Image (cartoon, helix red, strand yellow):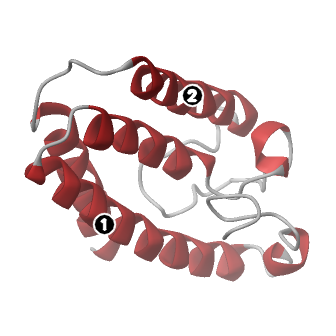
């Protein structure tokens, strides 16, 4: 149930980010949004279809990906969401978008901890394999 609530919070905040204001984005916001889409596409290609799920719960036969963008980030799809969200929240600002971005960040941080606990339960070597790999932003966290 916790996983479903986290996904609902994530998608709810994404909806507000997408529809909570206009789309007259300056070039830098469009570039940031495009970067987010590229990170998402790279993550999807690196992860493989057998591992992809919108829930933080790992699939039954999942494997730990350490290729592509997963060499640098543990949760690149969440990073992609935050990049796109920041692009619209700051490129075409509204109070609703700023609140949604903050909510999205909090939900994704909680989702990271929840997902990593599930991955450790499934793959006891997860902490060791992920040493030196940032969660959301290289050099920061």
Q: Which residue is mark 1?
A: 6
Helix or strand or loop: what does disc 2 sit on?
A: helix
User: What residue is drawn where x is 46% and y is 25%?
Assistant: 28
Position of residue 45 in the picture relative to residue 1 (left or right): right
Q: Is residue 4 visible?
A: no
Q: Position of residue 85 (x, y in %)?
A: 35, 42
User: As drawn, is 76 to the left or to the right of 127?
Assistant: left
Q: Position of residue 94 (x, y in %)?
A: 12, 44
> Is 96 located above or below residue 1 in the figure?
above
- Disc 2 and disc 1 in contact, CB within 8 angstroms: no
Left or right for 23, reference 71: left
- Mark 2 lies on residue: 35
- Above or below, comparing residue 60 to residue 11 in the picture: below
The structure residue drawn at horizontal position 42% and vertical position 56%, both measured from the top left corner, is: 55
Residue at disc 1, secondary structure? helix
Q: Nearer the viewer, mark 2 or mark 1?
A: 2
Residue at the (53%, 70%) spot, across then down: 112
Label 1 CA crowd tier, 10 Å (few <14, some 14–19, many 20+): some
């Amino acid at each position: 149930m916790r996983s479903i609530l986290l996904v609902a919070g994530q998608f709810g905040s994404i909806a507000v980010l997408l529809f909570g204001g206009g789309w007259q984005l300056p070039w830098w916001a469009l570039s940031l949004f495009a970067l987010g889409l590229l990170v998402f596409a790279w993550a999807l290609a690196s992860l493989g279809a057998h591992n992809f799920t919108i829930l933080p719960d790992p699939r039954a036969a999942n494997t730990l990906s350490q290729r592509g963008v997963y060499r640098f980030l543990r949760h690149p799809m969440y990073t992609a969401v935050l990049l796109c969200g920041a692009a619209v929240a700051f490129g075409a600002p509204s109070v609703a978008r700023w609140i949604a971005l903050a909510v999205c960040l909090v939900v994704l941080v909680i989702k990271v901890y929840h997902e990593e606990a599930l991955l450790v339960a499934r793959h006891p070597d997860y902490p060791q394999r992920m040493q030196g790999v940032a969660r959301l932003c290289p050099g920061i966290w």
